[in-house]
Amino acid sequence: MKLSDVLDITRQEPHCGLCKIDFLDTGVCSAGKKHGFVAYWPEGRMELARALAEHEVEPTETLLDIVNSCNLCGICDRQCTFITQRRPTKAQHALQDYVKTLQPGSLKRFPEDDILRDLRTIVGNDRATNDPVIIASYLRSIIKQKSTGKYYIVMPKTTEEIVEIVKLANKYKIPYLPRGNGTFFGVALQTLLAEPATIEQGIIIDLWRMKDLDIDPESITATIGPGVTSFELQKAAHAHKLRANVAEAESCVCANAQNLGIVTTWSNTYGWGTDNFIDAEYIDSTGTIQHLSDQEIPNPYASEQGLLSLSLIPSVIVTKLTLKLHRILDDEEAVFVPFATLADALDFAHNLAKRNIGISLAVISRKYLTEFISPTHEVAEDFNFIAEKYLKLNYVVDVICDSHSKKIVEELADVSFGHGMIKSLILGSSKLASMKDSSLLKMISEEENPLKAVFGGPMRKHFEKGLAAQPKDLVKVYDEDLREFFEKLYSRPELTDPIWLHSFRILPCRMERKHMWMYRGGYMPGDTQTILKVVDALEKPAEKYGINGAFGFLSYLERGKLAHLEYDYYYDHTDPEARKRVNKAIVESWRRQFAIKGVTPLEFICSKGLHRKEHILYPFLPGLSEEELEHFEDLIETLFGGEDTW
Amino acid sequence: MVKYLSQEWAEQAKKKVLTELDKAKDLKNMNASLLNVIQNVPPDNATMYYYIKFIGGNLEELLTGSDEAIKQKEAEFTVTGDYTTFVQISSGQMSSAMALLKNRVKMAGNKMKALTITKPIDTFNACISRLQTEY
């Protein structure tokens, strides 16, 4: 198999980084675990195979080591099929065949230089490199594609080692940039944000080894290192019947906290940003260790708002974070209220938010619901079609709450469903997708209120019966050799448990199965009218530039006073024309959002997650005037050049 | 070839801007004063200052040095950063706005006004980047 034969899958590599986490209880790649550098993980092998195929890197002796380190155990195929429908072992086979074509002895070791020697003195020989083959595996996830800069990758284990690395970078006058799991970079680097989010040369500090994790059940807190992922923290917290307010499973908690303050569906109850953080240890640009709790540091909450507060590179490296955990109640239940229109869903959810009903409370779209719970993108597409055309199921108010609140939600809602229906939809999703032309669905669509008919009326029994499926039925959509594994997997209760799925967040990366996405939206007043204006401000540019845009989810803060919206632009990041169009849509969506009072686009929250939201979101910014918006366009042109250069 | 941040460089840079840039078209008739605080200047990691003042798009002052007198100049904006970053800005490798975004420099001053001078300052930096300079 040639490298060019697998370009379709390697180009699509989204760098979600889930292969580094044992989220399916399969264990993780043994080579990755041993060596650490991204090149040894499935994610990195895919990128490396692409970079070699596209002649962006020349092979070195290290390539042999990387290729030989894989035992083709197949763990990555299970993990990656579950999330992105790709099989990394295909890239590994292509790499093995490629290596066979190289002349024996033709590969050379890449020479060490002074900077690398110094880095190795700090972290050890195996934990620092300047080898282009290893560096190539970081392309498109922290290094810009086709970057010609001189890079080093270093994997420290302790805070003190990072101090030495920062001082070394300052001594040699080169920039440095920390990398958690690369998930934010994986998305941003496909857009015009690539330049401000990356460094053009210098030291990449890969924090993967820094996995200290300590739960204190008495104070209900956790103290973690920067390599700890959301999944790992949640798993440790759950062992004590506690819950962490964390982002998607694969994201490193410290990096996510610092960058975005951790955006979740639990924010109306658990809060955002410093609502959850007790203390942080961080290293400043001089290599000095500081703590948020130090009395003599400058005000750590000082923050700026508005257009010129955009900064995608954090000024400090967080090396330890102490954060609050939350008790899991014995009677938590999930309840879902379906809606045909966004306005109705928002009104209903806002009403709950104002009354503090729901520990987790969100409005999720048909797109998210169908994509997250379907085993393949194709099933999701059909499910999406059925939900829209027959069921009028376009939005769902998604609530996790105690049994008392559940009764209130059910009383307020015309129709609702719970755990049982979600389980049926997950296990029956491929069966449902095959019912596109069924008479049952046509009959439902002819009802006056199809949502009520299917989720609340007499047809519910027929619908559930029609869906009735077992894991063995669902897994027919997978490659034959993986079906046994997936049958066992889907037989586990947590895979169909909405509360577990909301806590562990292993499904969102399924958004990346077909195409890359770009996160749009941000923070805004929680009233329905403002939110609809923002949705329109995001929808219009997508339509104008031919981008597939879709509402993702919305959650609340402060009893519904504020809301966070995620709206996504889906596009083919391997197509340069599509990238240009998405960049134009991004710029226009900023312009439109800034014209709405009180709206802070997500990018303008970046690097401010350790700050108090009160300093970032208040006072509500007035919408920019036409004159200010013209200056904004000048700024964009200064930063990114004219439209044609994007 | 002139040495970056030397008196000779300051004189030639000023002359180049005055002769090559149009006050209205290129510099948007801006009224602004800006003090750059350049840290870790080789060879002994000293701090230097680089001050510019525009009135109606006319470059009234362009001063460089390590004198306290420059530091004391009244400036609407103060931009602080490392020598290597200022080299990138003055040589046209990176715009000052991008340096701000990348957290390579810190700026103090009215952010809304800063927005209005982003483009003319970028044009100014592009002009002086064409000066044969030894960094």
Image: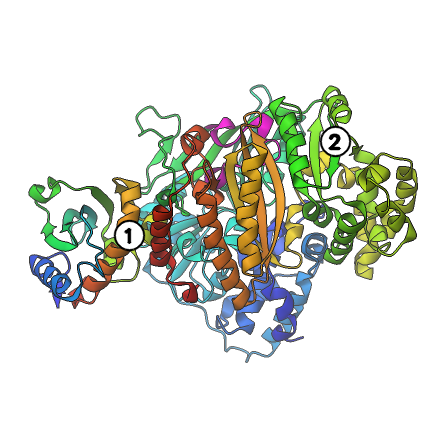
Q: In this orientation, does residue A64 appear?
A: no
Q: Give the range drawn in magenta.
A: A257-278
Q: Where is residue A339 in the image (x, y as percent from the top left)?
A: 73, 38
How many C-alpha atoms fall within 10 Å of the one at disc 2: few (<14), some, or many (≥20)?
many
**In the depicted view, which residue is nearer to us: A559 or B44?**
A559
Which residue position holds label 2? A334
Q: Does the magenta stretch include residue A277?
A: yes
Amino acid at dot 2 = Ala
Q: Does the magenta stretch include residue A628?
A: no
- Quarter holding the N terminus of chain A is bottom right
Whether residue A210 sits left or right of residue A91 in the image: it is: left
- Quarter holding the C terminus of chain A is bottom left
**Identity of the residue drawn at 58% across and 40% down:** A532
Q: In this orientation, does residue A188 appear?
A: yes
Q: Quadrant of residue A42?
A: bottom right
Residue A407 higher or lower than A135, as above or below: above
- Mark 2 residue element: strand
Q: Return the mark for residue A267.
A: none
Which residue position holds label 1? B118
Q: What is the C-alpha distance between the residues marked 1 and 2?
A: 50 Å
Give the label, 1 or 2, closer to the camera.
Answer: 1
Whether residue A488 sits left or right of residue A269 in the image: it is: right
Residue A153 higher or lower than B77, as above or below: below
| Discs 1 and 2 carry the same chain letter | no
**In the depicted view, which residue is nearer to us: B6 or A29?**
B6
**In the depicted view, which residue is nearer to us: A402 or A622?**
A622
Instruction: Kindly identify which chain the residue marked by label 2 belongs to.
Output: A
